[in-house]
């Protein structure tokens, strides 16, 4: 496994900590970022890259936008905490401190829908039903499902089993996995109408289901990432070496689920082998600032990852 360590580009321009980063679907040519400055930005990393090996070709100035910036999306009145992209890259959803869920048209740069109903900030969002449903998780301890095709502004379903803030949602087929600050992972099987609960015992930052649907990768606020068997709740592996006790830091699967990547509060990015849990690489990034999120480019043949940090990049 050859770990990509050469920096391709620095995507700058946000005025404050960047909370989320996602590659576009398909070829993974673009990167979306959401930040505390209330904007979502769409970048082309290759356009931003320079021959000097990853520095931004043009910083923010009166002469023009940051290097690689394709589009900036402004409608949020508060910080943006999460984003999700449809499989055809035509739309994306964003959530944050507004207590609303925003559905955007990528090309036109405008909102298609704004759903209100959450009683607190919205921490997480994902698409389901091949892009026809948006799933959101909130500080109000609820998960809500929104119909993209309906004119109704009401959620089509509400899950309120969490006892504290819902920090993460991940949709895979007919299943919705959620993580909460109450230390529990809840798996909703929409086809069977069932809910399954696993007790982790620590506040959860992120939940991601493996491609084969057999396991869940869970990041928690005790500087540990865990891999659980989805069927019986057995702990398969744990990953340590990063610092995560105060901030929401999300991990992700990489190399077709052969590895795990996470940021750290000390400015490091760590990559582990999924099966044996050993550290494969540990890199310094973002000037030692908190690395809050990482994203892996899952496009065929691509070996790229992007990171977001409190340094605004």
Image (spheres, rainbow, N blue to C red):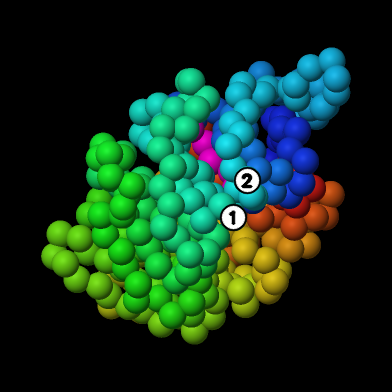
Is residue 183 shown to the viewer in this render?
Answer: no
Indicate whether 174 appears above or below 246: above
Magenta region, residue range: 20-25
Which image quarter holds the C terminus? Answer: top right
For residue 105, which numbered disc appears in the image?
none
Name the foreground residue: 67 vs 141.
141
Query: Quick check: is 14 in the magenta stretch?
Result: no
Name the foreground residue: 248 vs 75.
75
How many labels were placed on the picture? 2
> Would you name the residue on which mark 2 appears?
77
Mark 1 nearby-residue class (10 Å; few <14, some 14–19, many ≥20) = many
Label 2 vs label 1: CA separation?
A: 8 Å
Q: Is the magenta stretch mostly helix, strand or loop?
A: strand
Tag 2 near tag 1, CB within 8 Å? yes
Percent from the top left, x then y, of residue 260?
Answer: 53, 56
Indicate whether 230 appears above or below 84: below
Percent from the top left, x then y, of residue 257?
Answer: 43, 52
- State the image quarter where residue 148 is shown: top left
Percent from the top left, x then y, of residue 295?
Answer: 55, 45
For residue 97, which numbered disc appears in the image?
1
Is residue 245 shown to the viewer in this render?
Answer: yes
């Amino acid at each position: 496994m050859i770990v990509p360590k050469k920096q391709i580009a620095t995507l700058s321009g946000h005025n404050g900590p960047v909370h989320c980063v996602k590659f576009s679907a398909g070829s993974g040519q673009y990167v979306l970022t959401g930040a505390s400055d209330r904007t979502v930005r769409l970048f082309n990393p290759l356009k931003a890259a320079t021959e000097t090996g990853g520095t931004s070709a043009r910083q923010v100035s009166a002469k023009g936008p940051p290097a690689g910036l394709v589009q900036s999306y402004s409608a949020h009145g508060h910080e943006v905490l999460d984003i999700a992209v449809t499989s055809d890259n035509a739309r994306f959803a964003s959530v944050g401190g507004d207590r609303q869920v925003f559905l955007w048209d990528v090309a036109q740069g405008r909102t298609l829908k704004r759903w209100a109903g959450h009683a607190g900030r919205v921490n997480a969002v994902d698409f389901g039903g091949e892009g026809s449903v948006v799933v959101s998780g909130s500080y109000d301890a609820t998960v809500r499902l929104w119909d993209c095709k309906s004119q109704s502004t009401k959620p089509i379903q509400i899950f309120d089993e969490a006892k504290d803030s819902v920090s993460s949602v991940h949709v895979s087929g007919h299943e919705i996995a959620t993580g909460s600050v109450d230390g529990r992972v809840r798996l909703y099987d929409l086809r069977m109408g069932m809910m399954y609960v696993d007790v982790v015992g620590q506040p959860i930052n992120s939940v991601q289901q493996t491609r084969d649907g057999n396991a869940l990768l869970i990041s928690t606020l005790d500087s540990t990432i865990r891999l659980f068997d989805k069927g019986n709740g057995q702990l398969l592996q744990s990953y340590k070496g990063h610092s995560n006790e105060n901030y929401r830091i999300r991990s992700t699967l990489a190399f077709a689920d052969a590895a795990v990547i996470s940021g750290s509060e000390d400015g490091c990015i760590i990559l582990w082998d999924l099966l044996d849990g050993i550290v494969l690489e540990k890199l310094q990034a973002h000037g030692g600032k908190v690395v809050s999120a990482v994203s892996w480019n899952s496009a065929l043949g691509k070996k790229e990852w992007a990171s977001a940090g409190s340094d605004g990049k």
